[in-house]
Image (tube, grey):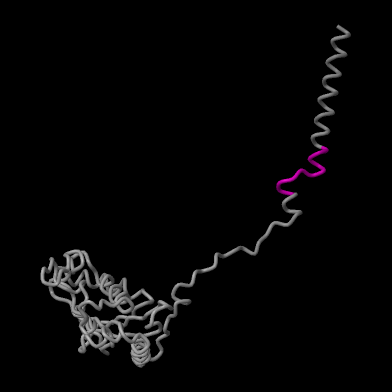
């Protein structure tokens, strides 16, 4: 069951522009994942952040494990690259942390849910209970220095872009196709020929009217003779 679910998710995510995924040693339970930040307002815009995801044999009843290969300077990222994010915590409420069941992992969650949560977390850090206390303090007290650390992480991440891989941008990823218009157009003569009356048409109706009048006149003469 887990293999089938993961394979379907893998095929779907492989079509997305904001991630680049591959299997590790052809193992469906271990993925190499790259998150590509396409939000131009993000401090991480243009970054290519590689991570490793491992899935339990009872997936989706238990959450996957997620770890950045290059640890980021971020309040919710541990020094070893692991994340402190509710969606990766075991199902059920946690009275110690105050996390509700709806915030944690559940069997209805999917890999896409995790990756989107991670992308959101990058720019919306939870500083009340940080995994990296120093990063949390810097974010609160020295925002310019924090932004500089983010810039360094972003530029460093680009070293992991595979050779020949074309990095998407916000413009290319969300470009809308222009509607196609046919070059064919009706000319005035064609419109007139198809939809308008011609001189021959008018003559035909004139002839019909004349015949009607002649017929009426003949009928009247017959009546007089009678």
Foreground residue, 72 or 181?
Answer: 72
Q: Is 117 located above or below residue 73 in the figure?
A: above
Foreground residue, 41 or 89?
Answer: 41
* Residue 62: percent from left, percent from top: 14, 71
* Residue 84: percent from left, percent from top: 20, 79
Residue furthest out toward the front: 141
Residue 106 appears in which quarter of the rendering? bottom left
Give the overall secondary structure of the magenta segment: helix
Residue furthest out toward the top: 226
* Residue 212: percent from left, percent from top: 81, 25
Tell me the quarter of the image containing the C terminus.
top right
Residue 138 appearing in the image:
yes
Residue 162 appearing in the image:
no
Residue 205 appears in which quarter of the rendering? top right
* Residue 146: percent from left, percent from top: 33, 87
The residue located at (26%, 89%) in the rendering is 71
Q: Left or right of 35: which side holds 66? A: left
Q: Left or right of 147: which side holds 59? A: left
Q: Is 112 located above or below residue 49 in the figure?
A: above
Foreground residue, 16 or 127?
Answer: 127
Magenta region: 193-203
Tell me the quarter of the image containing the N terminus.
bottom left
């Amino acid at each position: 069951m887990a293999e089938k679910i993961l394979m379907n998710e893998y095929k779907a995510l492989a079509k997305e522009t904001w991630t680049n995924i591959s299997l590790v040693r052809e193992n469906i339970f271990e993925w190499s994942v790259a998150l590509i930040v396409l939000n131009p307002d993000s401090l991480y815009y243009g970054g290519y952040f590689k991570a490793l995801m491992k899935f339990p044999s009872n997936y989706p009843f238990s959450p996957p494990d997620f770890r950045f290969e290059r640890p980021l300077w971020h309040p919710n990222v541990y020094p070893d690259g692991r994340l402190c994010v509710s969606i990766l915590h075991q199902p059920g409420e946690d009275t110690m942390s105050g996390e509700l069941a709806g915030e944690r992992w559940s069997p209805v969650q999917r890999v896409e849910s995790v990756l989107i949560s991670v992308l959101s977390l990058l720019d919306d850090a939870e500083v009340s209970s940080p995994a990296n206390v120093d990063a949390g303090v810097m974010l609160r007290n020295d925002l310019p220095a924090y932004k500089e650390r983010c810039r360094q992480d972003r530029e460093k991440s680009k070293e992991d872009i595979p050779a020949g891989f074309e990095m998407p941008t916000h413009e290319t990823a969300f470009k809308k196709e222009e509607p196609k218009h046919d070059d064919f157009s009706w000319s005035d003569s064609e419109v007139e020929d198809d939809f308008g009356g011609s001189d021959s048409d008018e003559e035909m109706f004139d002839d019909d009217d004349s015949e009607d009048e002649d017929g009426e006149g003949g009928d009247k003469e017959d009546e007089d003779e009678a």
